[in-house]
Image (cartoon, grey):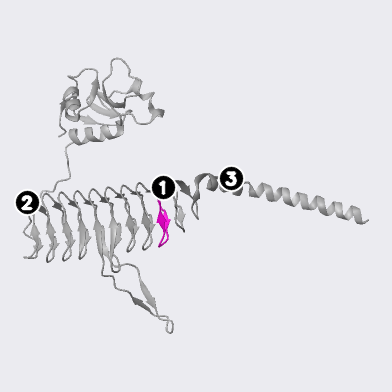
C-alpha cells in the first residue's frame, strides 16, 4: 500500500514550499491528465500548462516561475521533475525487495570473502575468493562475482549479473539484470601467413565509481593491462557497450545501443543519444551532446551539440541534410539546363 502524507508533512519532509490546503491527504502519484483526487502530479513542460486548469490532482509539483491557480495545491521548487521523483519515493511503496532476506542457504560464498553488515544475498549467488562486499548491499539471485572483486556500500545488483575477477564497484552502484562487468576486450592477432585469429588476453581491471547505474545487457570490458573506468554519477542505458581501456567521465548519459571502442575517453557531462558509435582512441570534450546515430570518428575538442555520420556541429549537419533533401529538384533543374544548353549549341552551329 502507498504511504500517506498531508501536503504540509510532505513539504516539510522535502524542505519545500507549498501553496494551498496543507491538510490535504496525498497517497499516490500520476500524470496531470490521469491523476485522481488523492494523487500528486507535476508540470515540467510548458506545453502542458493548460492541464493545470483541468487536472484532478490533489497537488502538483511546479517551479517557482509557474503561475499558480487559486484553489489548487502545489509543491513549489526550482526543479519540479526532481521534486516529483522525491515525492514518488516517499509515497509509493518499494515493490522491489526480495522475499529472500539475509544470506540464502543456496548461495556459494568462498571462505576468504568478506561480507559487510546488513547484506542481502539471494538464491544461487556465487562469490569467489578474496571478494569484499561492504555494508547494505543487495545481491539478487544467480549473480556471479569473481575473485578479488569488490562492492562498496549500498550497491544493488540484480539477477544474473556477472562481475568477473578484479572488478571494483564504488558506493551506491546499481547493475540491472544481465550486465557483464569485466569481460575480455575484443582483441585478436591475425597471423599474416595463415589468416588465423589468435586471442589477445586481457589482464586489466574495471573500476566503477560511486553513484553509477548500468542498464540491462550492457557490457563493460576490462583493460588489456591497465583499467577501464566508469566515473562518478554516470548513467548507462540498456544494450550499451564500453570497450577495453575506455575512460568514461563523470555524469555522462549513454542511451541504449550506444557503443564506444577501445581506449576512447569522454569528459564530464557528455550525453550520447541512442545508437551513437565512437571509434577507438578518440577523446570527447566536456559538455558534448551527440544526437541519435551519430558516428564519432575523430576527437571532439569543443563542447556543443553534434550529430551525423561523421559527427559535425549540429548547424553544419542540419544544413547538409537540407541540401541533400533538395538534391532531386536540383538534379531535375540541372538536366533541364543541360537540354537548354545543348539546344543552344545546336542553334549556334547551324
Q: Look at discs 1 and 3 and give the one toward the viewer.
A: 1
Helix, strand or loop at label 3? It is helix
* Rendered view: 277 above or below 31: below
**Residue 207's disc number:** none
Labels 1 & 3 near each other (Cβ < 8 A) = no
Read off the residue under disc 1: 288
Magenta span of residues? 274-290
* Rendered view: 46 above or below 98: above
Q: Nearer the viewer, residue 249 or 179?
A: 249
Read off the residue under disc 3: 322
Q: Look at discs 2 and 1 and give the one toward the viewer.
A: 1
Helix, strand or loop at label 2? It is loop
Q: Nearer the viewer, residue 68 or 17?
A: 17
| 245 left or right, relative to 294 | left
Q: Nearer the viewer, residue 193 or 274?
A: 193
Q: Look at discs 3 and 2 and give the one toward the viewer.
A: 2
Read off the residue under disc 2: 117
Amino acid at each position: 500500500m502507498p504511504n500517506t502524507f498531508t501536503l504540509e508533512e510532505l513539504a516539510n519532509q522535502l524542505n519545500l514550499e507549498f501553496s494551498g490546503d496543507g491538510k490535504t491527504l496525498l497517497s499516490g502519484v500520476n500524470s496531470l491528465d490521469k491523476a485522481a483526487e488523492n494523487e500528486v502530479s507535476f508540470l515540467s513542460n510548458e506545453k502542458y500548462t493548460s492541464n493545470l486548469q483541468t487536472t484532478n490532482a490533489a497537488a502538483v509539483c511546479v517551479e517557482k516561475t509557474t503561475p499558480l491557480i487559486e484553489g489548487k495545491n502545489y509543491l513549489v521548487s526550482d526543479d519540479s521533475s526532481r521534486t516529483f521523483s522525491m515525492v514518488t519515493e516517499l509515497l509509493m511503496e518499494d515493490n522491489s525487495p526480495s522475499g529472500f532476506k539475509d544470506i540464502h542457504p543456496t548461495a556459494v560464498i568462498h571462505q576468504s570473502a568478506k561480507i559487510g553488515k546488513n547484506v542481502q544475498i539471494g538464491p544461487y549467488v556465487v562469490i569467489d575468493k578474496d571478494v569484499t562486499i561492504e555494508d547494505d548491499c543487495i545481491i539478487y539471485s544467480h549473480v556471479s562475482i569473481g575473485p578479488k572483486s569488490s562492492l562498496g556500500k549500498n550497491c544493488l545488483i540484480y539477477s544474473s549479473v556477472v562481475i568477473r575477477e578484479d572488478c571494483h564497484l564504488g558506493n551506491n552502484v546499481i547493475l540491472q539484470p544481465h550486465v557483464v562487468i569485466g569481460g575480455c576486450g575484443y582483441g585478436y592477432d591475425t597471423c599474416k601467413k595463415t589468416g588465423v585469429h589468435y586471442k589477445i588476453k586481457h589482464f586489466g581491471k574495471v573500476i566503477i565509481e560511486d553513484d553509477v547505474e548500468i542498464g540491462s545487457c550492457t557490457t563493460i570490458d576490462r583493460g588489456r593491462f591497465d583499467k577501464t573506468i566508469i566515473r562518478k554519477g554516470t548513467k548507462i542505458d540498456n544494450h550499451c557497450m564500453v570497450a577495453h581501456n575506455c575512460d568514461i567521465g563523470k555524469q555522462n548519459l549513454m542511451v541504449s545501443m550506444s557503443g564506444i571502442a577501445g581506449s576512447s575517453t569522454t569528459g564530464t557531462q557528455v550525453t550520447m543519444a541512442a545508437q551513437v558509435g565512437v571509434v577507438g582512441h578518440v577523446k570527447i570534450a566536456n559538455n558534448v551532446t551527440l544526437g541519435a546515430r551519430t558516428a564519432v570518428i575523430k576527437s571532439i575538442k569543443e563542447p556543443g551539440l553534434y550529430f551525423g555520420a561523421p559527427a559535425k556541429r549540429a548547424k553544419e549537419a542540419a544544413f547538409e541534410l537540407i541540401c541533400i533533401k533538395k538534391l532531386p529538384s536540383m538534379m531535375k533543374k540541372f538536366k533541364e539546363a543541360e537540354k537548354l544548353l545543348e539546344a543552344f549549341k545546336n542553334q549556334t552551329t547551324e
